[in-house]
Amino acid sequence: MEVKDILKTRRLELNLTLEEVASQVKVSPATISRWESGDIANMRRDKIAALSKALQISPAVIMGWEQPEDNTKAIIDAYNKLSPAAQQRAREYFEDLLSNPKNLRNQ
């Protein structure tokens, strides 16, 4: 899968609009659309970092160096089935897990 396809697929998996991603990355919705269509192939480093955060994927995936993890879609599908309150609890749980260095790889 090409990077442009990964970007669009991931945005749709997260149920994000072009406008929502653009707002997080601080670019126009047209720029996001052009990245997803392949019209713009090069991105600035700060935009790659912001886009990886918005799409919750590794910058290496955006750079085309690695493919997204296989289990990502299953996790997102399960998350999207949750109520908004349950989604908030899930985010808080993961933030709690991430705050403990013992839970992280390479620590």
Image (spheres, rainbow, N blue to C red):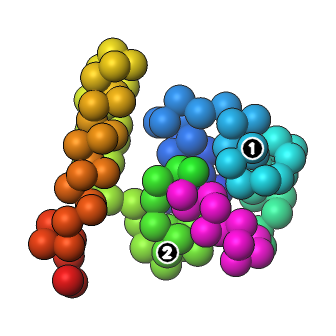
Q: Position of residue 80 (x, y in %)?
A: 36, 25
Which residue was labeled with disc 2? 60
The foreground one among 87 and 29 is 87
Classify residue 75 as left or right of residue 34.
left
State the separation of the CA atoms marked 2 and 1.
22 Å
Q: Which residues are magenta?
A: 43-53
Q: Are marks 2 and 1 in contact (CB under 8 Å)?
A: no
The residue drawn where x is 43% and y is 73% is 66
The residue drawn where x is 34% and y is 28% is 87
Q: Residues within 10 Å of mark 2 (few under 14, many from 20)?
A: some
Which residue was labeled with disc 1? 23
Residue 14 visible in the picture? yes
Instruction: Farthest residue to the left: give it.
Output: 102
Element class at badge 1: helix
Classify residue 103 as left or right of residue 94.
left
The residue drawn where x is 55% and y is 61% is 52
Sooner in the amino-acid sequence: mark 2 or mark 1: 1
Residue 3 visible in the picture? no
Element class at badge 2: helix
Q: Position of residue 82 (x, y in %)?
A: 30, 20
Q: Main secondary structure of the magenta part?
A: helix
Residue type at tag 1: Ser
